[in-house]
Image: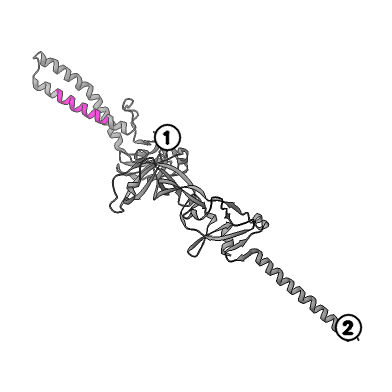
């Protein structure tokens, strides 16, 4: 009797387990069908739509630009960069500069020393002293010649000595001015062997080649000063693109390591000389926002796009399109919860939108899933 009840109990447990398994399989089948009913139709519940931050959108007309891509750098005009050398040879006595230092025009860059400077000053003072006497003698001989009291030979001699000394005086005066020595205040008591080299422009110290104790020749570049106030864009385009480029066309600039941030400018000048080695042409442009020039330095590498033309085309956001193998798909809304996977033909991509080449295949009211498409289709 006990055995009979025991067998009934085992049979009861078996039936419950079997029913549980069938229920589980049915539930899994139902859930699977809730997500994908057919290969081309996807069901998205309201909860899935909300939690996945999905969005709907329609085909819209968007601006598409035809661009010429170019590489280049930021640069300054020649008058904004100065390679400073000493006009006179000498030893660097003092230099207190670092790259990046801000300079005013006329500020002392460094000083140089040479005993030969003393000789130049002495020669100037001597020519200055002799000039007064020779001028007086020349004027006296000129008056005597008019009165036939002196010979023409004496007059010509006085004239020659005065003219030669005057030329020497003027030469030495200009030389002292280049040495930053005031010839009008120079006396035998304030001769000096050290002179200062001044900055010819305002700007920043960008290169320093001189150091204390170094001997500089007049041709040696000691310091480079750069003024970035007129920083401009220099791009190189290939010669085949020259007919497309015109002045005032917009330029979009990106830094090499910051592709997301776009800086805007315009074409200013077009060089008409072709680089024979590279077969390229230089394009000069200006930034629209002059304040942005302070963010950059001459020589920084940039990637540019010159916008040569623009037109409007039917488009969808880039996120609305998924590429699978060599085809492109969108999800078209059919009803409240179902979306159909549909092939589209695409064109150019610009400013986050992709051109749709077959918009006539869809009605004006057709809605597309424009966010979260790739994960649904690729799954």
Q: Residues within 10 Å of mark 2 (few under 14, many from 20)?
A: few
User: Residue 331 at what x, y percent from top left?
Assistant: 56, 58
Q: Is residue 304 visible?
A: no
User: Image height check: is 157 above or below 235?
Assistant: above
**Who's the residue at 87% across and 83% down the image?**
6
Relative placement, left or right, of 168 versus 196 is: left
Query: From this viewpoint, is residue 21 visible?
Result: yes
Q: Earlier in the sequence, mark 1 or mark 2?
A: 2
* Quadrant of the rendered image containing residue 333: bottom right
Mark closer to the observer (1, 2): 2
Where are the magenta residues, as a range?
158-172
In the rendered structure, the answer to whether residue 223 lies left or right of residue 276 reads: right
Question: Which residue bears the numbered disc 2?
Answer: 5
Q: Quadrant of the N terminus?
A: bottom right
Q: Residue at x 14, y 15 (%)?
A: 143
Q: Is-magenta flag for residue 223?
A: no
Q: Nearer the viewer, residue 201 or 350?
A: 350
């Amino acid at each position: 009797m006990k055995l009979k009840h025991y067998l009934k109990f085992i049979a009861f447990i078996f039936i419950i387990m079997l029913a549980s398994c069938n229920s589980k399989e049915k539930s899994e089948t139902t859930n699977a069908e809730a997500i994908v009913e057919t290969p081309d139709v996807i069901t998205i519940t309201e909860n899935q739509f909300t939690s996945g931050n999905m969005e709907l959108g329609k085909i819209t007309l968007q601006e598409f630009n035809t661009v010429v891509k170019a590489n280049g750098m930021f640069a300054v005009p020649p008058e904004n960069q100065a390679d400073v050398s000493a006009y006179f040879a000498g030893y660097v006595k003092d230099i207190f500069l670092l790259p990046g230092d801000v300079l005013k025009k006329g500020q002392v860059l460094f000083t140089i020393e040479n005993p030969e400077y003393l000789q130049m000053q002495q020669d100037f003072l001597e020519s200055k002293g002799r000039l007064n006497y020779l001028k007086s003698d020349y004027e006296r001989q000129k008056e005597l010649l008019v009165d036939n009291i002196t010979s023409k030979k004496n007059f010509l001699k006085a004239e020659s000595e005065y003219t030669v000394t005057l030329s020497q005086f003027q030469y030495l005066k200009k030389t002292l001015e280049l040495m930053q020595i005031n010839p009008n205040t120079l006396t035998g008591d304030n001769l000096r062997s050290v002179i200062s080299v001044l900055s010819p422009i305002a700007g920043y110290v960008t290169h320093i080649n001189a150091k204390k104790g170094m001997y500089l020749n007049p041709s040696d570049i000691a310091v480079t000063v750069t003024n970035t106030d007129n920083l401009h864009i220099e791009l190189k385009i290939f010669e085949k693109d020259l007919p497309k480029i015109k002045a005032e066309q917009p330029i979009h600039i990106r830094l090499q390591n910051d592709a997301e941030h776009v800086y805007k400018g315009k074409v200013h000048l077009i060089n008409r000389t072709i680089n024979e080695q590279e077969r390229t042409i230089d394009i000069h442009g200006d930034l629209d926002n002059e304040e942005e020039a302070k963010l950059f330095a001459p020589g920084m590498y940039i990637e540019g796009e010159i916008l040569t033309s623009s037109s409007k085309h039917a488009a969808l956001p880039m996120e609305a399109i998924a590429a699978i193998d060599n085809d492109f798909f969108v999800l078209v809304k059919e009803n409240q919860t179902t979306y159909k996977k549909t092939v589209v033909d695409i064109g150019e991509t610009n400013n986050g939108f992709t051109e749709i080449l077959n918009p006539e295949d869809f009605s004006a009211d057709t809605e597309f899933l424009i966010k979260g498409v790739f994960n649904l289709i690729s799954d």
